[in-house]
Image (tube, grey):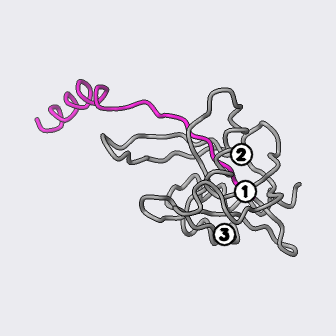
Amino acid sequence: MILSVRNAFAASVGPILSRPHRRQVAALCLRRKGSRAEVLMITSRGTGRWILPKGWPIAGLSDAEAAMQEAWEEAGVRAAPRGLMPLGTYRAVKTRTKGLPEPVNTIVYACDVTDLASKWPESHQRRRRWMRPEDAAHLVREPGLKRLLRDASLLHRAK
């Protein structure tokens, strides 16, 4: 009886409550330090957890260009994208200030950092830190992002 009620609820109310995944773009910012790769991580504004620079697509820009714009605004990065093809994607749940948690698919573009500004649009709201990809993978919670970060050292060698 309980199983049939649960199934009926899931079939009738579940689709109403489920929300389609929105899309964000992110920049996986890379540099070489000696013989190893490093990635640039930033803190989120709300919780202070370590994340990649990311945001919503920007009208008039390709997704790769929008990811580079987010890298500038959130991390002060000047970077050269590695092309228009994404490195990969990961899923996350974005908690908005108002409303329900929102499922998001984040498309990640790799870029080579050419310069870091000492002041940038969100410098008063975030911290940034270079770290080994393996260390960054331990600090993030999204399994898909963990995988992309673990693969980053191989990506840097393939440049």
Front position among marks 1 and 3: 1
Whole-percent x, y for residue 74 in the image: 61, 54
Mark pair 1, 2: CA separation: 8 Å
Quadrant, the C terminus? bottom right
Question: Relative to the observer, which residue lies in front, 62 or 119?
Answer: 119
First in sequence: mark 1 vs mark 2: 2
Pointer 1 with pointer 2, Cβ within 8 A = yes
Amino acid beneath label 3: Glu
Q: Which mark is residue 68?
A: 2
Quadrant, the N terminus? top left
Assign a secondary structure to mark 2.
Answer: helix
Amino acid beneath label 2: Met
First in sequence: mark 1 vs mark 3: 1
Q: Residue at x 60, y 34 (%)?
A: 57
Q: Is residue 50 left or right of residue 101?
A: right
Q: Which mark is residue 134?
A: 3
Magenta segment boundaries in residue numbering: 1-29
Whole-percent x, y for residue 98 in the image: 31, 43
Assign a secondary structure to mark 3.
Answer: helix
Assign a secondary structure to mark 1.
Answer: strand
Q: Residue at x 23, y 24 (%)?
A: 12
Pointer 2 with pointer 3, Cβ within 8 A = no
Residue behind mark 1: 77
Whole-percent x, y for residue 129 in the image: 65, 70
Front position among marks 2 and 3: 2
In the image, residue 79 above or below residue 106: below
First in sequence: mark 2 vs mark 3: 2
Q: Residue at x 73, y 38 (%)?
A: 65
